Amino acid sequence: MKNFKKEKTLIIIKPDGIQRSLIGEIIKRYERSGLKLIALKMLVPDKNLTQKHYLIDPQWKQKTGQNTINAYRSHNETPPFSDPTKMGNFILDKLVKYFTCSPVIVMAWQGMHAVEIVRKITGGTEPKSSDMGTIRGDFTIDSYAIADTDKRAVRNLVHASGSPEEAEAEIKLWFKPSEILNYRLLNEEILYDVNLDGILE
Ligand code: CMP
């Protein structure tokens, strides 16, 4: 069985998260889950890094384009493109402008089911329909329709890896091995230990 307890994921606080002074609020939500922060840096990404990040998954344009088209149709709206790859190209172009306009914060987090837990805390991609209680549901108001009409990326505060495999590739892209820290967090005793002995004196 895979070692879920050491699963890693990548989170990026996007330019709107920085510009809206939500850095602390966003990190707090991941931190209090019990996951462990193992790498963090602030930088202004360039076009090349942004494109590499989103194109790690060779199917990204197709999948993101199709998801967007489906979201439009589920609201009885007409997408700007009916071809998923064209839709994906349009989105990637806007993402480059978005990612290169301000610093971002990139982090790697580790722990039990890190990818799924972080996706749950983050909420669905389109803020209009992200659940309340999630970062995107609580702090953003954007939609695909308005973003696409305004020809810009959806401002949804954070990026979170979609799968453990994607996380591994994304972490490799953003961090050198020496920037990822191995350390023990005292919280891990209560989160992972099988025998809760040694607590009572
Ligand atoms: P993220 O989770 O980083 O994955 C892809 C990003 O593309 C997404 O968050 C949004 O910021 C952006 N995005 C997705 N769909 C659209 C769309 N239809 N229009 C504009 N931006 C989009």
Image (tube, helix red, strand yellow):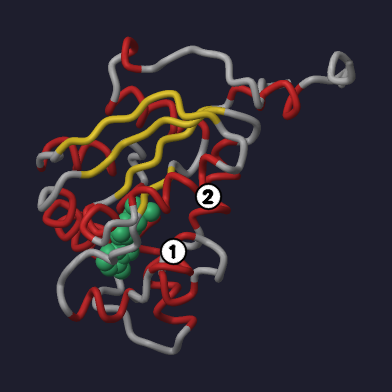
Residue 78, horizontal then vertical, whole percent: 33, 85
Residue at 47%, 34% (x, y): give it.
9
**Mark 1 falls on what kind of element?**
helix
**Mark 2 falls on what kind of element?**
helix
Is 69 drawn above or below residue 74 in the view shown? Answer: above
Residue placed under numbered mark 1 in the picture: 136
> How much space separates mark 1 and mark 2, taking CA atoms?
11 Å
Residue at 50%, 69% (x, y): give it.
130
Outermost residue toward the front in this view: 201
Foreground pick, 45 / 199: 199
Amino acid tagged 2: Arg
Residue placed under numbered mark 2 in the picture: 119
Is 109 drawn above or below residue 80 in the view shown? Answer: above
Residue at 34%, 62% (x, y): give it.
156
**Pointer 1 or 2: first along the chain:** 2
Foreground pick, 165 / 79: 165
Which quarter holds ligand 1? bottom left
Q: Is 102 situated left or right of 193 in this image? A: left
Q: Is residue 165 at least partly visible in the picture?
A: yes
Rate crowding at label 2 as few (under 14), some (14 to 19) or many (20 or more) other CA atoms within 10 Å: many
Residue at 67%, 22% (x, y): give it.
2
Rate crowding at label 1 as few (under 14), some (14 to 19) or many (20 or more) other CA atoms within 10 Å: many
Q: Quadrant of the C terminus?
A: top right
Q: Quadrant of the N terminus?
A: top right
Tell me if label 1 and label 2 are in contact, CB under 8 Å: no
Amino acid tagged 1: Arg
Residue 107, horizontal then vertical, whole percent: 37, 34
Foreground pick, 46 / 169: 46
